[in-house]
Image (cartoon, rainbow, N blue to C red):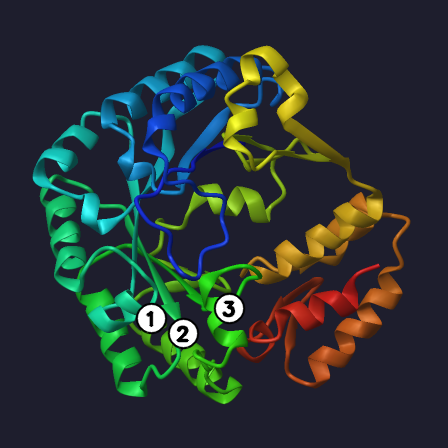
Amino acid sequence: MAGIYIHYPFCKSRCYYCDFYTITDSSLKPPFYEALLYEISLRKDFLKQEPIETIYFGGGTPSLLDPAKVNQVLETIHKHFTVVDLPEITIEINPDDVSKYYAKQLNQTQVNRVSLGIQAFYNYHLRLMNRRHKVMGALKAVDILQAEGYDNISIDLIYGLPEMTKAEWEKTLNKAVKMNIQHISAYHLTYEEGTVFDKLRKNGTLIPPDEDISLWQFNTMTDFLENNDFIQYEISNFGKMGRFSKHNINYWQNKPYLGLGPAAHSFDGESRYWNISDISKYLRIERKNDDIREKEILTASDRFNEYLMTGLRTYWGIDIAHIEQHFPDKNSDGLLKTIGKYIESGHIKAEGNKYYLTRKGMFISDKITAELFV
């Protein structure tokens, strides 16, 4: 099984924390759309006839793409790839773009899962991040989509915001759960190089919360969501049973996927590919073909490290039997020695030959996986 990711780079405005490749020049939308359709046909052999079980429209703001064009993209994918019956098809949506008309039009497509970029339930937090929607708009967007029949809705939340109080975070979680949604992705605010937030942090305008506050927010969130029938199946992702993101699971389980659009990444099981982050060059794809894409051949050590990094993030963990079968040249004894240290400290738990991060371990997952790398 495999997945396809479509990067729609257009945004009306740029969020202050975002370091994804985005553009605001709407005049480039028509040529981008034609280039995207061409790239779908160009990459038809990349996945080697693997059945496509997930398709994901990300961005950028793919809710700016007319639903009729979404349908045409999906029809083009079906034309050139083998797609399973009832694939998971997700689109990221800005709450501000949702109207009754939009929801009805979207419902005429094959999209069966939506991911709403709500991020926060306080307007001053949204203004701080330069989000263009307001809280009431986010709540209304969920109501409209549910009224139209969407029953697989995910929302994004951000914690670790400067000066966010405990009460604000608790009320945020309460509001999220009361919306009767099926999935929540919650990420700690990061200050990526070159973003507005990074500049504000460096000049002292924004002061990140202390680590103990972030840890409290993480633990409070995990406890609260688990008590409300959400399963933490990955460090930042919580879903009701049967409503996990199949597309993201494919990433974490190192299944092949094809990325389309500028800055999109692909993986064929052995190598990683990425389209360059340049819309002008991407629009010349019909003349230049693979001139827009770069490639990295992964070594056995690269693949081993990625298995550790992605496996430990999930509640499926890592399996020593899998390592010995697929990475026989790696020293599992040395790995177990390092794992043993973290078992003693309460950061990793063992069940037979499988190992998982504990709640305590999740908060320092990057440090742990870095120590396990070869």
Label 3: few (<14), some or many (≥20) within 10 Å?
A: some
Q: Which mark is residue 222?
A: 2
Looking at the image, which residue sits at the far front?
203
Taking the spot 46% from the left edge, 67% from the top edge, the residue there is 197
CA gap, disc 2 and disc 1: 5 Å
Most foreground residue, 310 or 14:
14
Q: Position of residue 36 (x, y in %)?
A: 45, 21
Q: Position of residue 90 (x, y in %)?
A: 35, 38
CA gap, disc 2 and disc 3: 31 Å
Which residue position is annotated with label 1?
225
Label 2 secondary element: helix
Q: How many marks?
A: 3
315 on left or right of 76: right
- From this view, report whether residue 67 is shown above or below residue 193: above
Identified by mark 3, the residue type is Lys
- From this view, report whether residue 20 is shown above or below residue 8: below
Q: Would you identify the image quadrant in which residue 285 lies?
A: top right
Identified by mark 1, the residue type is Leu
